[in-house]
Amino acid sequence: MDNVNTSSRLIDTMITLDMVTKSQQQPPKFDWSVDLIDSIWYHISRYLTVNDIHRLTRTCSSLYTIFASHDFWSYLIRRRFGHAIWHRSIKNSLLLPDDQKIVDLSRRKPCRSKSIYFELLKRKRISFADFNNFTFDTNRNYTTIVESSSLNGYVLYIKDTIETCYSLHIETMFENILPGNYDVIWRMKLNTPYMFGETEFFASAEQVNPGKTAYMRWTQDDFLSMYSCFYCDIAKTNLWFYQTIGTVEINGNKPCNVFISMTNHDSIHAKHGVYLDYVELKLRLE
């Protein structure tokens, strides 16, 4: 009987000690890197910069897996650029073969949808000061001058003499542009608020059946009206202006080149004080 009582007291003591031990243990801590479901991280990423996302990928393998996945960058494309652009560049795109839609973490293959995201995000500009990117007519001398307010510190400068008056023609090419609709923007300025004759701006995708092309024709009165809208002394005007000449459309699901040109047809009057900074393709959100 004593042995039974002793055993019972021993068990009671062990249970009591176990309960005390459990009560003294700290509750399990919440691990935000693994306990949050992926969809919450997707939502959080909308308020983060790209640098923030990159820093988070270095904190643990769980976040690296989330932020290196095709699904994550596909989600960002849809949220930032809209369903139409996501549908064209991801869902029905030949840019992203099916066998590369998921990142191979063991081999660290680049995530194609991430590459597409950065390509869509990148500002597409060509500086007129880079002669290698342009074709010019051979009737005049083109030069570059220092301009601190320009894209890269230099601009293309045109100032004809009275003895050399010819039509003006400049063209360039944007290469491997993703499908979509793009505003074509010129940044330029004039010493005088007009340019004699008619000036045509043109842009088109190099496709067999191109979509919308950009075209604008300005007379010297159009230039004058544009400068007058600044409500300043047009006799002293020397202001940069941004002009959207139209929208160019790239059809299909493959990237292609976009041809852009500027032509002034007046061969009688000199082109005095024309400054050209850059031409830009700006993706339109759909």
Image (cartoon, rainbow, N blue to C red):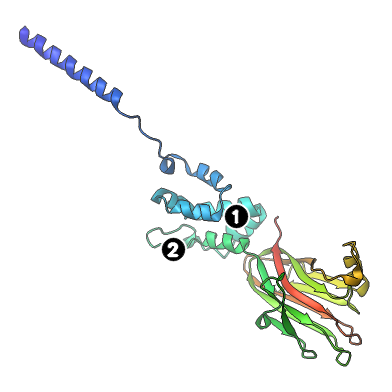
Residue 118 x %, y %: 57, 61
The quarter of the displayed image where residue 243 is located: bottom right
- Say which mark, if any, is on residue 59: none
Residues 167 and 226: in front is: 226
Three-letter code for the amino acid on which mark 1 is drawn: Ile
Q: Residue placed farthest to the bottom in the image?
A: 163
* In the depicted structure, whether residue 109 falls above or below residue 126: above
Q: Would you say 107 lies left or right of 71 here?
A: left
**Mark 2 sits on what residue?**
109
* In the depicted structure, whether residue 132 falls above or below residue 23: below
At x 41%, y 42%, the residue is 34
The quarter of the displayed image where residue 239 is located: bottom right
The C terminus - image quarter: bottom right
The N terminus - image quarter: top left
Q: Residue placed farthest to the left in the image?
A: 2
Q: CA distance from mark 1 to mark 2?
A: 20 Å
Q: Would you say 185 lies left or right of 88 here?
A: right
At x 72%, y 82%, the residue is 144
Q: Would you say 232 lies left or right of 56 here?
A: right
**Mark 1 sits on what residue?**
77
At x 91%, y 74%, the residue is 220
Residue 75 x %, y %: 56, 51
Residue 215 x %, y %: 82, 71
Residue contact at pointers 1 and 2, CB within 8 angstroms: no
- Looking at the rendered structure, the secondary structure element under dot 1 is helix
Instruction: Residue 24: tell me if it is visible.
Output: yes
How many numbered marks does the figure carry?
2
- Looking at the rendered structure, the secondary structure element under dot 2 is loop
Instruction: Residue 250: tell me if it is visible.
Output: no
At label 1, counting other C-alpha atoms closer than 10 Å, the crowd grade (few under 14, some 14-19, many 20 or more) is: many
